[in-house]
């Protein structure tokens, strides 16, 4: 094989391709959609029309009988139809810009929305907690059964965009998370996440190397387990120039363990009676992908909000701790991991004699831009709230602005959780082989135990008091 | 590197459109996305069967018709 060489694009700084990212990358679309909702909500709030946002952000309420639920839908059908039309319009516009056909997106989203109504309504049943009918878990299980048991045409995947929905949800989540909390808890999240990420990566890498795996595969697996799942594995695979078959192996292992952890982490947290903030931090440290992590964290948040015996704290604490740990502590460092591993790959693993010079700008190119929207949303609502007393905030701002945004965030997350199940076809995943499975699983074991130790012992006081 | 210099992003062996990548790398769309920023402009080299940066290059460069500049961001 001829030598491959990474080259610097220093002179290839044509503005056109860079600006095109603003409408050709889903990170930016998540920002436009999420911030668009936040800004529109603020305008409605500031002009005394906040009832419009509340009217659109409809969701099934708590119910005890099917007749009661039916009455709710009959009385609010216009609200649901309007909300559906708005979601469809914005998502279809964004997905069309990303290259999907509207005629495939529309039927796909109709199905997704109907399933989301079913899932959210099921979660509002007053007996739901008793049967573990947490909407995130139900959405995932329902999606998996449909995609693997019944089967759906591939064309419907056009509207099942897991990452797009979770990124939109995260931007909306920023509006409910005070910026001061990010500043206060962010450093601890970064410290804890960094410890676990580095240790997990090294375990996977060296176990893999010991088993004789290609170092580029080891790095790809390590990033998948340590940083942010599939996105990190793919980013590092590209940075180190992995073999084509490496990335699918890492993807399979991330999906397998992420789905196991969606069910296992909330279950074990519940068994250990972990307070909501601590469980959220643990899930943020030990889940592998944002979407999967939110499914687990929101599930535990639902238990906390449902006042399940033995779980102290609020649902917000679980969600906020998870977000700080996963988004602030892990996701934003993906570019640095890719850049560092590109250097190591070039200087240590592939001595071709050629000059290969990775560019530090890669850190920005790979930066998950939706995080900017998350921070901007937090800043906007924090600025709005700063001019109110706590009593007025709770009485005026929270119910008119923050709560409707939170309800819309719930919809976005449920679209995401359903999409995970609907797009995960186990038969279509790559075979991993024994070596990669053992290496990755060793990292999982260390990650889970170390994450629990740091969350529930070392930094327990910090996470337990979060957002109180 | 100067504009127009051979690089994978302008090579006939290289593909980095998001739909193709999600089809070629099984499971990617389940918990990730080829449309995300983290991918940059990475893609698959069919000549060497590797997943790599659009900014890489090799001796087997074959100009792709219509490719004039680096397009790392294009999905």
Image (cartoon, rainbow, N blue to C red):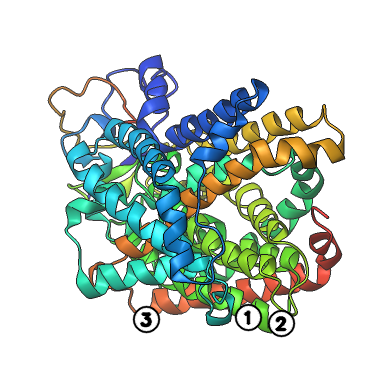
What crowding class fits label 2: few (fewer than 14 Cα within 10 Å), some (14-19), or many (20 or more)? few
Indicate which disc residue A386 carries.
none
Relative height, residue A397 to residue B31 (above, below): above
Relative height, residue A194 to residue A340 (above, below): below
The residue drawn where x is 27% and y is 69% is A146
Between disc 3 and disc 1, the foreground one is: 1
**Label 2, label 3: how many angstroms apart (C-alpha)?**
32 Å
* Disc 1 secondary structure class: helix
Check if mark 2's residue and mark 3's residue have beta carbons within 8 Å. no
Residue A252, visible in the rendered structure = yes
**Label 1, label 2: how many angstroms apart (C-alpha)?**
6 Å
Indicate which disc residue A272 carries.
2
Q: What x and y, as percent, mark residue A155?
A: 18, 51
The residue drawn where x is 78% and y is 71% is A312
Identify the residue position indicated by label 3 in the image: A434
Residue A2, visible in the rendered structure = no
Q: What x and y, as percent, mark residue A43?
A: 60, 22
Q: What x and y, as percent, mark residue A103?
A: 17, 40
Q: Is A242 left or right of B65, judged from the image as shown?
A: right
Q: Nearer the viewer, residue A71 or A134?
A: A71
Pick whichever of labels 3 and 1 is earlier in the sequence. 1
* Disc 3 secondary structure class: helix
Tell me the subunit letter for badge 2: A
What crowding class fits label 3: few (fewer than 14 Cα within 10 Å), some (14-19), or many (20 or more)? few
Q: What x and y, as percent, mark residue A69?
A: 46, 63
Q: Nearer the viewer, residue A51 or B60?
A: A51
Q: Nearer the viewer, residue A348 or A192?
A: A192
Indicate which disc residue A268 carries.
1
Between disc 2 and disc 3, the foreground one is: 2
């Amino acid at each position: 094989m001829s030598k491959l060489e990474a080259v610097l694009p220093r002179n290839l700084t044509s503005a056109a391709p860079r600006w095109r990212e603003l409408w050709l990358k889903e990170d930016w679309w998540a920002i436009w959609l999420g911030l668009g909702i936040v800004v529109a909500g603020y305008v409605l709030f500031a002009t005394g029309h906040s009832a419009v946002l509340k009217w659109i952000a409809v969701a099934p309420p708590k119910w005890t009988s099917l007749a009661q639920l039916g009455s709710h839908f009959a009385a609010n059908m216009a609200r649901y139809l309007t909300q559906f039309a708005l979601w469809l319009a914005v998502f279809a516009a964004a997905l069309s810009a990303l290259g999907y056909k509207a005629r495939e997106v529309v039927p796909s989203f109709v199905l997704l929305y109907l399933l989301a109504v079913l899932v959210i309504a099921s979660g509002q049943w007053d007996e739901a907690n008793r049967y573990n009918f947490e909407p995130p878990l139900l959405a995932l299980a329902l999606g998996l059964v449909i995609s693997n048991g019944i089967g759906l045409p591939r064309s419907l995947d056009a509207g099942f965009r897991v990452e797009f929905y979770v990124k939109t949800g995260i931007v909306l989540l920023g509006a409910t998370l005070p910026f001061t909390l990010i500043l206060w808890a962010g450093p601890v999240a970064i410290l804890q996440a960094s410890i676990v990420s580095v240790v997990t990566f090294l375990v996977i890498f060296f176990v893999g190397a010991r088993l004789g795996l290609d170092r580029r595969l080891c790095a790809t697996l390590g990033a998948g387990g340590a940083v942010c799942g599939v996105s990190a594995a793919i980013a590092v695979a590209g940075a180190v120039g992995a073999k084509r078959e490496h990335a699918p192996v890492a993807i399979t292992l991330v999906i397998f363990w992420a789905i196991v952890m969606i069910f296992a982490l909330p279950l074990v947290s519940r068994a250990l009676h972990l307070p909501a903030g601590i469980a959220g931090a643990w899930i943020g440290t030990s889940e592998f992908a944002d979407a999967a992590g939110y499914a687990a964290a929101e599930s535990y948040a639902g238990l906390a909000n449902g006042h399940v015996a033995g779980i102290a704290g609020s649902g917000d604490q679980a969600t906020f701790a998870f977000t700080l740990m996963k988004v602030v502590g892990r996701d934003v460092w993906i570019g640095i991991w890719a850049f560092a591993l590109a250097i190591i790959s070039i200087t240590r693993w592939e001595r071709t004699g050629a000059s290969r010079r990775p560019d530090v700008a890669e850190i920005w190119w790979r930066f998950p831009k939706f995080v900017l929207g998350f921070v901007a949303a937090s800043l906007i609502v924090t600025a709005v709230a700063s001019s109110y007393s706590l009593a007025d905030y709770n009485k005026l701002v929270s119910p008119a602005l923050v709560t409707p945004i939170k309800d819309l965030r719930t919809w976005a997350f449920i679209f995401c959780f359903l999409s995970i199940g609907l797009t995960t076809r186990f038969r279509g995943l790559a075979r991993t082989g024994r070596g990669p499975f053992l290496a990755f699983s060793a990292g999982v074991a260390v990650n889970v135990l170390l994450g629990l130790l740091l969350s529930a012992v070392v930094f327990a006081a910090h996470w337990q008091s979060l957002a109180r | 590197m100067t504009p127009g210099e051979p690089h994978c992003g302008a090579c006939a062996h290289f593909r980095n459109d998001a739909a193709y990548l999600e089809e070629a790398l099984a499971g990617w769309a389940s918990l990730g996305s080829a449309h995300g920023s983290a991918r940059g402009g990475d893609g698959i080299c069919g000549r060497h069967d590797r997943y790599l940066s659009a900014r890489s290059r090799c001796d087997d460069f074959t100009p792709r018709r219509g490719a004039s500049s680096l397009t790392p961001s294009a999905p």
